[in-house]
Image (cartoon, grey):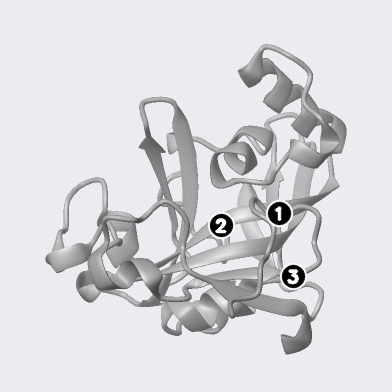
Amino acid sequence: MARSFLSRPADEVARALLGCRLCRRLDDGTVLSGMIVETEAYLGPEDQAAHSFGGRRTERTEPMFMRPGTSYVYFTYGMHYCMNVSAAAENVPHAVLLRAIEPLEGIERMLEFRSASRGKLVRLQDLCNGPAKLCQAMSIDRGLNRVDLCSSDVLWLERGKKVSDLEVGQTPRIGIANAGTWADRPLRWVVRESPWISRRFRAQS
C-alpha cells in the first residue's frame, strides 16, 4: 500500500481502510489475510481516548509518532494484543485501531491459533470479530510492533474492495466511556451489513 494513502488524518484513514486487506505471512510461508470491516480513529493529543492524549510520548506509544503505515501493537488487560496503524504524518500521533476483519486466506490456521488461545474450538463467525481476536487469529503480537506496513513482507496492507458510503456506518468508539466529550464522537466505522463486525451496527436516531 502506498504511504500516501495513510498520510491523512486518522478519521479519513479509518474510513478508507474499510475494504482493504490486512495480510500476514507466517514463518512457514503461509499467508493469512482478511478484509477490514471495522475500524476506530484516534486523533492524537486532543483525543481523550488516545494513548497519545496530552502529547504522551513513551516507548510504548512511539509507533504512533513514526511515519504513516507503522504498526502499533500493544498489550492490554494483561492478556490481549491489539493492532493499530499509524496515520497522518511523522510526529503527529494519529492511529487507526483495526477492530475486525472478514477472514479470506489461511482460515484453517486462523482457527488453530484462536482455538489454541481459547483452549476450545472457535466458531468461524467469532474468528476475527474484535481487535484481540483479530490479533490472535493472525498471530500478531509485540514482535510485530513498529513494522512498516507499506514495505514489509511479513505484515502488510493492500488496497482491496471499494466500499460505498451507503455500505458504511459510523458510531461512537467502543469501551471508552471515560474519555469525556470524546466518548460520544462517531469515530468508529463499520461495513453495515457485515456479519464479521464486533458489535452489530445500529443506526443512531
Which of pointers 3 and 1 lies earlier in the amino acid sequence? 1
Residue 18, position as x, y percentages in the image: 68, 71
Relative to 61, 80 lies left or right: right
- Percent across and percent down for residue 91 are 24, 73
Residue 123's spot in the image, x, y percent?
82, 30
Q: Using the image, tell me which numbered label, if any, was put on residue 101.
A: 1
Q: Quadrant of residue 149?
A: bottom right
Point out which mark residue 74 bears: none
Looking at numbered disc 2 in the image, what kind of residue is underneath it? Leu
Q: Pointer 3 and pointer 1: residues touching (CB < 8 Å)?
A: no
**Of marks 3 and 2, the one in the foreground:** 3
Q: Do the CB atoms of the residues marked 2 and 1 lie less than 8 Å apart?
A: yes
Viewed as shown, does residue 13 lie left or right of 121?
A: left
Q: Which residue is mark 2?
A: 98
> Which residue lies under the disc numbered 3?
192
Amino acid type, label 3: Arg
- Measured in 3D between alpha carbons, the distance from the residue under mark 2 to the one under mark 1, in whole angstroms, is 8 Å
